Image: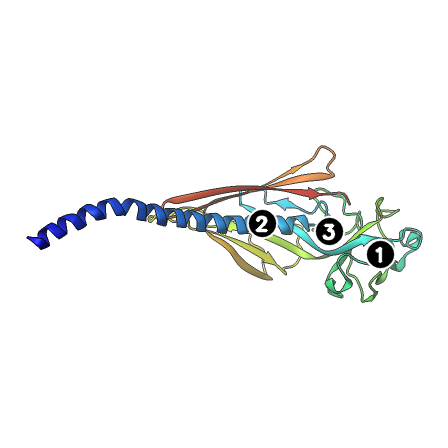
């Protein structure tokens, strides 16, 4: 009799306990998904803010991907000292106040010195690895923190940057969503990866060929990137949407990143 009564009481208690226990695990799952999505959005936003002006381009064929050239340093140059660069050619420029950040951020003979990157995301010369309207050549060894030397060349366009700005670019970076969907168990099947260290290409490859990649998020059920240029095209807005699903629990986050396109 005692065993029967104890079993009845335990069954009644289990009915009342099951709901709060399930709610706890659901809440923990949602928190984990939200944290994963938020970390991915913040990482993408931090990289996009370091993008070379006018180099951001989302993929245009429905594939959720975005690419840009990432800067490692920059500053303003002495226009008087660089005047010959835009007429007869020169082998270096001098930066006011040094580089931001320091010169050690530059990989010699690998990173690119960029002046006046003015094209929009559909035809950026530096992405295409050409330089008819912006200088995107490789830099030579650094003499001091305030001076960059390179092979003798004449900068284009004539006159250089109106704002006397320059950037140092380490190379292209891509974020690509792949395999987005939901399986039979209610789990997202997609992944979000970051690609870097691959060669420049005029045509955006998804995913990029060569280089390195790292997993940023998984369990993706939705992913998208948008690029909206401002009226003056001096500023733009990148929209990032990520949707994660696990055990039929879905979390969606949206983030917008301001892009400075002033060359």
- The crowding category of the residue bearing disc 1, from other C-alpha atoms within 10 Å (few below 14, some 14 to 19, many at least 20), is few
Residue 214 location (% of width, % of height): 54, 59
> In this view of the protein, can residue 191 be seen by the observer?
yes
Kindly identify which residue carries mark 1. 97
| Helix, strand or loop status at disc 2 | helix
- Where is residue 132? Give x, y as percent: 80, 49
Query: Residue at left 74%, top 49%?
Result: 125
The reply, left or right, for residue 30 in relation to residue 199 is: left
- Left or right: where 94 falls relative to 210: right
Q: Nearer the viewer, residue 145 or 160?
A: 145
Q: Which residue is the extreme one toward the top? A: 231
Q: What element does badge 1 sit on? A: loop
Element under disc 3: loop
Proximity of marks 3 and 1: CB atoms separated by less than 8 Å: no
CA separation in Å, label 1 and label 2 = 30 Å
Q: Identify the residue under disc 3.
A: 126
Q: Nearer the viewer, mark 3 or mark 1?
A: 1
Q: Quadrant of residue 74?
A: bottom right
Of the pair 127 and 35, the residue shown nearer to us = 35
* Residue located beneath label 2 in the image: 42
Q: CA distance from mark 2 to mark 3?
A: 26 Å
Pick whichever, 184 or 5, lies toward us. Answer: 5
Distance of label 3 from label 1 (alpha carbons): 26 Å
The answer to whether 68 appears left or right of 206 in the picture is right
Question: Do the residues under discs 1 and 2 have CB atoms within 8 angstroms?
Answer: no
Circle 2 residues within 10 Å: few <14, some 14–19, many ≥20: few
How busy is the neighbourhood of tag 3: few (under 14 within 10 Å), some, or many (20 plus)? many
Where residue 88 appears, x then y in whole percent? 93, 55
Mark 3 or mark 1, earlier in chain = 1
Query: Which residue: 58% across, 49% down?
Result: 42
Q: Mark 2 near mark 3, Cβ–Cβ under 8 Å?
A: no
Is residue 168 visible in the rendered structure shown here?
A: no
């Amino acid at each position: 009799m005692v065993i029967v009564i104890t079993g009845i009481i335990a069954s009644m208690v289990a009915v009342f306990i099951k709901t709060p226990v399930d709610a706890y695990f659901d809440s923990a799952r949602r928190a984990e998904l939200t944290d994963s999505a938020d970390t991915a959005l913040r990482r993408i936003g931090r990289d996009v803010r370091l993008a070379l002006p006018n180099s951001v381009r989302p993929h245009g064929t429905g594939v959720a991907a975005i690419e840009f050239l990432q800067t490692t340093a920059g500053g303003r140059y002495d226009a008087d000292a660089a005047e010959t660069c835009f007429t007869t050619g020169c082998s270096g420029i001098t930066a006011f106040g040094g580089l931001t950040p320091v010169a050690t951020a530059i990989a010699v003979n690998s990173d690119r010195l960029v002046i006046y990157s003015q094209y929009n995301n559909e035809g950026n010369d530096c992405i295409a690895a050409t330089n008819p309207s912006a200088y995107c050549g490789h830099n030579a060894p650094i003499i001091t923190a305030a001076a960059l030397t390179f092979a003798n060349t004449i900068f284009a366009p004539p006159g250089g940057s109106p704002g006397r700005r320059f950037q140092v670019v380490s190379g292209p970076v891509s974020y690509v969503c792949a395999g987005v969907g939901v399986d039979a168990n209610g789990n997202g099947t997609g992944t979000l990866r970051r690609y870097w260290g691959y060669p420049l290409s005029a045509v955006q490859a998804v995913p990029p060929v060569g280089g390195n990649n790292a997993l940023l998020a998984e369990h993706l059920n939705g992913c998208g990137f948008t690029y909206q240029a401002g009226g003056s095209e001096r500023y733009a807005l990148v929209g990032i949407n990520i949707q994660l699903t696990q055990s039929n629990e879905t979390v969606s986050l949206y983030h917008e990143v301001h892009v400075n396109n002033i060359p």
